[in-house]
Amino acid sequence: MAIKVNLDLMLVKRDMTLTELSEKVGITISNLSILKTGKAKAVRFSTLNAICEALDCQPGDILEYELKQNSKSET
């Protein structure tokens, strides 16, 4: 199981660049990039709130639970 970050998709839907989002939420481009690429291990609610406000979306539009398939077949 994993949490997938769809920030890049929301940026495209809102026709916004990472730089523009960075300016709106006051978070560095490098920190947003870490989140966007799925390399972040955690996200503060205050950060998520600021991103959702800037993109006019819900947290579920950005974060998605993805169930990974077991590599071994069950018998």
Image (tube, rainbow, N blue to C red):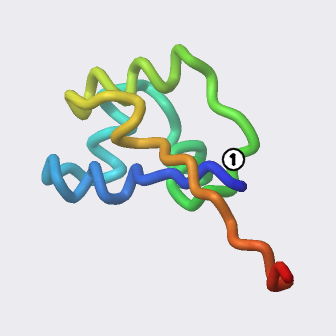
On the image, numbered disc 1 is attached to which residue? Answer: 40
Location of the C terminus by quadrant is bottom right
Residue at 14% across, 53% down:
15
Q: Nearer the viewer, residue 20 or 72?
A: 72
Residue at 41% across, 30% down:
59
Residue at 59% across, 43% down:
31
Asked if 24 appears above or below 35 in the picture, the reply is above
Specify whether 70 is left or right of 48: right
Location of the N terminus by quadrant is bottom right
Q: Disc 1 residue type?
A: Ala
Residue at 56% across, 48% down:
65
Q: Nearer the viewer, residue 71 or 40?
A: 71
Instruction: Give SS at disc 1.
Output: loop
**Residue 40: x, y in percent?**
69, 47
Q: Quadrant of residue 56?
A: top left
Specify whether 34 is left or right of 16: right
Asked if 6 appears above or below 75 in the picture, the reply is above
* Residue reaching furthest to the top: 46
